[in-house]
Image: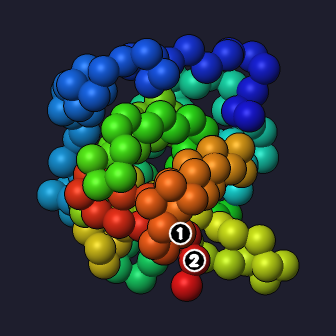
Amino acid sequence: MVSTAEPIRPDGPDLATASLAEIAKAVAEKRLPPVEQWNPTHCGDSDMRIAADGTWFHMGTPIGRMALVKLFSTVLRREADGSFVLVTPVEKLDIAVEDAPFLAVEVTSKGDGRERQLAFRLLTDDIVLAGPEHPLRLETAADGTPRPYLHVRGGTDRPLEALVNRAVFYELADLALAEQARDGGPLGLWSGGAFFAFAG
């Protein structure tokens, strides 16, 4: 986790009890800076790193204030060469990312089959509705374990993704297995009108 100094307190709705309309409203109200429109001069390195478990570090020390992590995450951008930067209208600084820049730590499912909608909460408290614009994809790590990712923002050529943590992936797998047992067909889940396969 980020730090014991400041516990994570979700700002948005409780995904387990919120209606789909309430979740969609929270997503629509989230306004991000127009980082894709900013082209400042590159200013060097930020001395910051996002670890594979979602922890943000500055000069080797975990950032203990979640409010700062949330703020920095809003000005994160991926460059054409695949690198990551923190960008404002006046400066651009490199940031190291060990795996994905975000971590999905909670999921809720509304509906079934083709009508299902999956809503994910990220460690930064952002909410992402999986669907055609925010697809789920599954990779296999070198050790054979599944590595699921969720597209958070950015274009398909410069995506910012969230690694779906193990507990959340197990929830998704349970849903997919139950649906497959009930309806047959391939292993996977629908969300937002798109089907995401969990097996090749």
Is label 1 or label 2 in front? Answer: 1
Q: Secondary structure at mark 2?
A: loop
Give me the residue at 45% from left, 60% from top.
Answer: 183
Name the side, left or right, on which 191 lies relative to 32: right
Give me the residue at 43% from left, 16% from top.
Answer: 17
Foreground residue among 157 and 176: 176
Give me the residue at 79% from left, 79% from top.
Answer: 144
Q: Are marks 1 and 2 in contact (CB under 8 Å)?
A: yes
Q: Amino acid at mark 2?
A: Ala
Of pointers 1 and 2, the one earlier in the residue sequence: 1
Q: Is residue 90 something one can see in this rendering?
A: no
How far across and down, in percent of the image, does residue 116 sit? Answer: 34, 46
Q: Pointer 1: what residue?
A: 187
Alpha-carbon span between mark 1 and mark 2: 6 Å
Name the side, left or right, on which 83 lies relative to 89: right
Disc 1 crowd, CA 10 A, few/some/many (<14, 14-19, 20+): some
Give me the residue at 55% from left, 85% from top.
Answer: 200
Q: Residue furthest right?
A: 143
Q: Is residue 14 something one can see in this rendering?
A: yes
Q: Secondary structure at mark 1?
A: loop
The image quarter containing residue 196 is bottom left
The image quarter containing residue 128 is top left
How far across and down, in percent of the image, does residue 124 sit? Answer: 51, 34
How far across and down, in percent of the image, does residue 118 sit? Answer: 40, 44
Q: Amino acid at mark 1?
A: Leu
Q: Where is 133 relative to 82, above or below?
A: above
Q: Pointer 2: what residue?
A: 199
Disc 2 crowd, CA 10 A, few/some/many (<14, 14-19, 20+): few
